[in-house]
Amino acid sequence: MSRVLVLAWGNPSRGDDALGPELVRRLEELSAQKAEAWRDYEFLTDFQLQPEHATDLAERDLVLFADAAATGRAPFSFSRVRPARDPSFSSHAMSPSAVLSVYRQVFEQEPPDAYLLAIRGESFELGRPMSAGAQRHLDAALALAARLLDAPAAANELRAHG
């Protein structure tokens, strides 16, 4: 089992909502160059987080959730995620905190360390391409994600300087 998981979600048909999946695509390309250093890493994408994603967290040391954000700081925000039941807990479109809470409930143990990389988007209309601003934000987020994957133990320092 891969010790580090990058789990991104978004709809590639909705403009900047594709930021999470696009981050994963670029990280997968980069992983080919870093094959040995990143050999224990797995990259997953989906349209939305669901309760079933809790099983993807099993036996991980670190999880990086990645998504587009319609609000918040540009180019991105990077924060620690803690388990919490929230209004999304009983739906099929869940928050990272709710997924961690499901993990805790199902596995009866604490989830792995988890962080959220929320990449600021600007345009989420159906059928639109990714905006130029979102592409710049994605470049900055990719740099931070690569630093994290190069040194997963430094996640808290990245959060402080991200």
Image: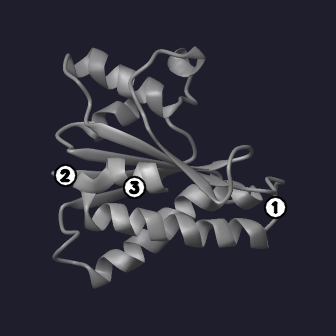
Q: Is residue 7 visible?
A: no
Residue 17 percent across, percent down from the top left? 68, 54
Could you say which disc has been placed on residue 34 in the image? none
Mark 3 sits on what residue?
A: 158
Q: Sequence order check: which comes first, mark 3 or mark 2? A: 2
Q: Within 10 Å of the Cα at label 2, are there few (<14), some (14-19), or many (20+) other Cα atoms? A: some
Position of 156 with respect to 151 (left or right) is right
Q: Sequence order check: which comes first, mark 1 or mark 3? A: 1
Q: Is residue 63 visible?
A: yes
Q: How far is disc 3 from disc 2 in space, using C-alphas?
A: 19 Å
**Pointers 1 and 3 in contact (C-beta within 8 Å):** no
Which residue ends up furthest to the bottom in the rendered image? 33
Mark 1 sits on what residue?
A: 127
Q: Secondary structure at mark 1?
A: loop
Residue closest to the eye, 103 or 97: 97
Q: Within 10 Å of the Cα at label 3, are there few (<14), some (14-19), or many (20+) other Cα atoms? A: some
Q: Within 10 Å of the Cα at label 1, are there few (<14), some (14-19), or many (20+) other Cα atoms? A: few
Res. 101 image quadrant: top left
Residue 9 percent across, percent down from the top left? 54, 48
Disc 1 marks a residue whose amino acid type is: Gly
Disc 2 marks a residue whose amino acid type is: Arg
Residue 124 percent across, percent down from the top left? 79, 53
Q: Secondary structure at mark 3?
A: helix
Q: How far is disc 1 from disc 3 in space, using C-alphas?
A: 34 Å
Mark 2 sits on what residue?
A: 3
